[in-house]
Amino acid sequence: MKKQILILTLIILTNICNGQIKAVTEKGDTIYVFDNGTWKSELVKKVSSLNNISVKANVKIDDFSGDRSISTEMWNSFGVNSSRAKLSGMASYYKDGIYAITLSISSNLGCMSQQRSTLKVKLSNGEVIDFIQVSKTDCSNYVVASFIPISEAEIKNTNLKSLIKDNVDLLREYDWVSMRIQGTEYYTDIKPRKSKKIENPEQFFRQHLTAINNEL
């Protein structure tokens, strides 16, 4: 997100601690300028503490190939959209460093299409992680789809594993603040939903992916 400032005319509004300066560009956009000459469009929000991993991970080893797969327990109703439909999900790990997120929600999105439908996750640091659907196409009104953290344009990249790892590292470090599931016709936006069973829904990716990594 950080970019070197080349030519910007700034109107200084107010100083912020730790050398951060809040400023406005000629176009009226608010940015935060740092002492080292870099800037961000928004400050990183404080990440909630991840003291304990409450998620359980189940490890399976194939009797013939010896390949290891890991899956986490389902988190029910940890997210909600504007229609009050609730999102549930879990995470998985397969050989060769492939991580997947499986989500389910009752919503009419047209079809959820393999290698076409997408998931976008906005993190508390402002980054957006792109996912592509890898599960089979499903045209029902109850969405169940699996995604890997890579964009459609990167799916054939020779550095696929490295790109996935980089995205997984970000997902493990920051809370999520919103998601967008995009079908062939419609999309739905989702926010964290706190409940007695899920006290920190914003930690879904951090909890589940860390639980997997603890088993690797």
Image: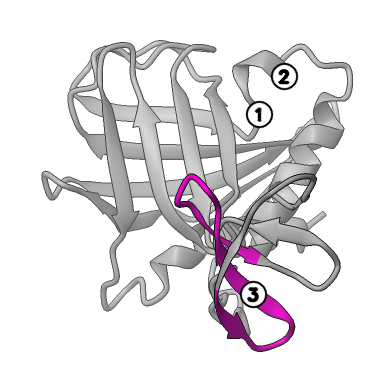
Q: Nearer the viewer, mark 3 or mark 1?
A: 3
Query: Which residue is tagged 3?
Result: 21
Say whether marks 3 and 1 touch (CB < 8 Å): no
Query: In what quadrant of the picture does the C terminus appear?
Result: bottom right
Residue 16 drawn at (x, y percent): 61, 84
Please give left or right for residue 158 compared with residue 215 in the image.
right
Residue 86 drawn at (x, y percent): 22, 49
Say whether marks 1 and 2 touch (CB < 8 Å): yes
Distance CA(mark 1)–CA(mark 2): 6 Å
| Circle 2 SS class | helix
The answer to whether residue 106 is above or below residue 80 is: above
Query: Which residue is tagged 2?
Result: 154
Distance CA(mark 3)–CA(mark 1): 34 Å
Q: Amino acid at mark 1?
A: Ile
Query: Which residue is tagged 1?
Result: 150
| Near-viewer residue (88 or 30) | 30
